Image: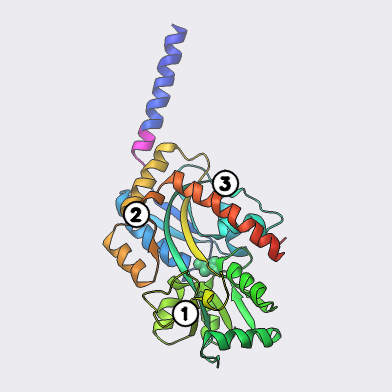
Amino acid sequence: MIRSFARAAALVALTAATSAFAAYPEKPVTVVVPFAAGGPTDVVARTLAQAMGTQIKGSMIVENAGGAGGTIGAGKVARAAGDGYTLLFHHIGMATAPSLYRKLDFKPTEDLIPIGAVVEVPMTIIAKPQMAQTTLKDLLSFVKTNADKINLANAGIGSASHLCGMLLQSALKADLTTVPFQGTGPAMTALLGGQVDLMCDQSTNTTGQIKGGKVKAYAVTSKNKLATFPELPTLASEVAGFEVGVWHILYAPKGTPADVITKLQTGLQAAVKDAAFVAKMKDLGAEIMPVDRQNSAAAKALLASEIAKWSPIIQAAKVYAD
Ligand code: ASP
């Protein structure tokens, strides 16, 4: 009797859990972007949220939590309830922060569950409109000889712009003054206004400004030239081996039920095929991830391999944050 009562209670609990999932999402899902609004991570997250909300039959709202190269927003989601209502949209910084920060208040591979990889975005080397140099060669030699006079904008230690700038300074043996922002959206405003000199940032932030002739553009950090900017050389053509691609992954906090992860994964896979998403990404030079990376297991493997890839490079460059 007692046993059958316990079995019935367990069945009720199981049914409740199943039906709780079946109704997901019952309220808006918040997608935390760990950078300021108006920047490259933000623009991809908002386009994805729009398309993915339709797919999961709910709404996805973007919240910006910038600062400390993305680690503040990422930490916030790492500590959030694993109920499917708080997600994180982040980039390569998730793999570089563990090596760049002596102390990080979350564990990227343990506290967050990757849902799927979304896009990979090339970076571009751009400068304020007043920069006199016209070719990449000229810019690099100007940087080498005038390092103490040049300001380099970034989104804080652990950001993609920081990583790119750090690698460039290390390759050129030039020590520039870095100026951190909460994201490269506000950094772009400063660059346009001539308050900072240089920036390395995703094409998702720079394409419109380059095409509109609002900033000087010098190079792309992809292996090959981009179809969108055939006139721009690769940075690797002057700095051998320089290649950075900024991949983005959508995450949920640990403890999120497997069924919810599956539902989000399915929604993500459909959202990246959405015509408006595809058109916007193409316009901004972002490559949609291959289908076999748009799932939890593959995104988890990508994160682990990128942590392993960047750790020795960052250690060799001897850059840390406390
Ligand atoms: N592009 C920035 C970075 O350097 C982040 C952002 O504002 O999206 O990481």
* Label 1, residues with CA under 10 Å away: few <14, some 14-19, many ≥20: many
Q: State whether the magenta stretch is mostly helix, strand or loop.
A: helix
Tell me if 261 is positioned left or right of 177 in this view.
left
Q: Residue 161 occupies which quadrant of the picture? A: bottom right
- Residue in front for this viewpoint, 146 or 242: 242
Numbered mark located on residue 52 in the image = 2
- Residue in front for this viewpoint, 232 or 150: 232
Spatial separation of the CA atoms under disc 1 and disc 3: 35 Å
Residue 270 in magenta? Answer: no
* Label 3, residues with CA under 10 Å away: few <14, some 14-19, many ≥20: some
2 or 1: tag closer to the N-terminus: 2
Q: Is the residue 186 above or below the residue 147 in the image?
A: above
In this picture, which residue range is highlighted in magenta?
A: 19-24
Q: Which residue is mark 3?
A: 109
Tell me the mark number nearer the camera, choosing from 2 and 1. 1
Q: Amino acid at mark 3?
A: Thr
Q: Which residue is mark 1?
A: 233
